[in-house]
Amino acid sequence: MSKFVLLALLLLSLAGCGSGGSNDVDAAPTPAEPSPPTDTPTTKETLPLLPLESKMTQVATFIQLANQVRYFHPSDGAIGTNWDEFTAFGIFQIAQTESHEEYVDILRTLFAHMAPDLVINGESAVEYVEPDSSDSVRFWLQDGYVEGPATQSTVYSRRAIAERFINLKNNYNLEALYKESLPAGIEVELPVVIKESSGITTPESSETVTGIDQYDIDNKFSDPYARLVAAGQLWAVIQHFYPYLDELDLRWNEELEPLLIRCLESVSECGLAMRSLLTKTGDNHNGLYSEYTALGDYSPALGFGWFNDKAVVIVNDGTDVPLGDELIEINGQSIDALIEQKREFSLRAPNRQAEQIVNFDLLRGEQGTAVTLGLRKSSGEQYEVTMQRSEFAYDLNRAIQNKITHANENKVIELEDKVFYVNLSIVDGPDVAPILAELEGASAVVLDMRNYPIWAGWTNFLPHFTDIGLRTLPLYQYFYLHPNQVNAVLDEQRQGFTTRQPFYDIPVVLLSSRYSISQNEHAFGHAQHGGIPILGDITYGINGNIQEINLLGGSQQGGLTAIFTGMKVTQHDGSRLRGVGIQPDMLVPVTLDSLQQNKDIQLEQAVDYLRQQINLAPVDN
């Protein structure tokens, strides 16, 4: 690995789940001095909306090429370009073409300034000359998707690196030209390495685009051009930077045009199409946030869990609806049919779709709106209840999870016979030493990590309970040097913890839940290597720091923000973790009956297991 990779690794923080940056990666050029005022104000024409239905293959090809230049062509002009405006303007230009020849000419004109050495169907504005070995060159070193100088901690980076070409060739499997046959009869040769001298790239480039300055270009999602820009960028970021793309059972390059066609229809259809696109990644970290794609923020005051393929009441505070009653209809529509309708837009892998829909999506809507629920008692009797959407859906979803995981605020409790309970989900770094002191003389310990843990807690606590140390699940970070992940450099991140003193040579067991996700699974992977047994439910099925895409400025500025996972993590044997989860050593799922009786059967069975390890009879529950 080169020194640049080593520098990147020094920045790596391997918490199971993290956040990417939130700024725009393609830094805007320094603003020009304002023009002096004139008596006659200059007005710009709104970009005319032209028919696009017959040009969608050409539009999709342009968007694909534009994002390749955006993320992999290291010229000054490409770095300085306002890509939202450029892409919208390019779509408008393509809408006016009447022949293939015109289309090719427009593509060359659009990229002539920012990427003059880009070859389209055999021609470019300036001939590309591959650098000599001794030349100083610039290329993009990207170990994930990043949107510029990060305002929050991120393990990913995107840097325009200057290096001697000979060093670059020695350190990376990097071709100076990326060649591809695109749809619509377009052949491209894209330089990903170009000469640089005194911080300026050659051939000379600029962000100028002929004709763009006469238009006022709308970047709101309500504008059809802007919708196509946002949807195309989302597709392209996944295409170039999603580390699980090779695991997906679909041709990602065939997803772009259908996505754009749906986005042309309407705002609502585009929002659903983008949710559908993310769902196809099977990434259980997925998120899509905006006013245009929201399902509504409020639900009626009932929380439903997914048990035995049924949606049943498990949170009923302030209502007369009994726990355990089954939801069978919403406003006269069958629950089974509604769940199937919503699977495509659930943002989850198949292993978590039904649960996500029932826990969170099924009943969401606008605050104060009414909804009629059809329910069925255990006796078979059916009845209806009409309720207002009065509860914040995110709070209700958390209450459901807290109920199923028996979340509590107790950090350490002595149960019986010197068997202790430690709530490792809420233990922080400063708590570790005092809790270890309380465990002096303990006969066994239950460690509860059914909810999301704190990094400084579990990493400092678990090494005291294994004599062979801990090691992470196989965790990989990619270095993306060409479009479409061609010749991406796979780098395994190694992490582990040695045994710490005092070492507690006593039986121990970890509790897992169906909501144990990301950093939970990171911790369980370490525990598996260390021989610490796991008891409970199969975990959620995703790990690796998240990445954030801000489209049209992001959700805080009227656009959209999408979330996906930027690292690839597998099971210890190399099999899939994404959409599968970690299988506990002792599978003890929570049951509806146990919730109705308010019994923590996972904790009870963990205690019984530990009592057997210390030769005590199980407790009669």
Image (cartoon, grey):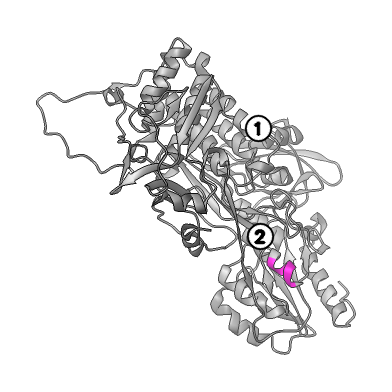
Amino acid at dot 1: Arg
Q: Residue furthest left?
A: 39
- Label number found at residue 251: 1
User: How many labels were placed on the picture?
Assistant: 2
What's the residue type where badge 2 is placed? Asn
Residue 100, magenta (yes or no): no
Residue drawn at x 64%, y 46% as measured from the top left: 244
Q: Secondary structure at mark 1?
A: loop
Q: Secondary structure at mark 2?
A: helix
User: Of the residues tagged 2 and 1, which is closer to the observer?
Assistant: 1
Whole-percent x, y for residue 486 in the image: 57, 41
Question: Is 396 placed above or below 363 here?
Answer: below
User: In the image shown, does 534 or 555 lie closer to the viewer?
Assistant: 534
Among the two numbered marks 2 and 1 on one chain, the one whose residue lies closer to the N terminus: 1
> Label 1: how many residues lie within 10 Å, few (<14), some (14-19) or many (20+)?
few
Q: Was residue 529 drawn as part of the magenta stretch in this picture?
A: yes
Question: Which contiguous range is marked in magenta?
Answer: 526-530
What residue do we see at 72% from left, 84% from top?
504
* Residue 71, percent from left and from top: 45, 40
Say if residue 297 shows up in the picture. Answer: no
In which quadrant of the rendered image does the C terminus lie? bottom right
The circle drawn on residue 402 is: 2
Question: Rounded to the nearest whole Å, what is the CA distance between mark 2 and mark 1?
Answer: 39 Å
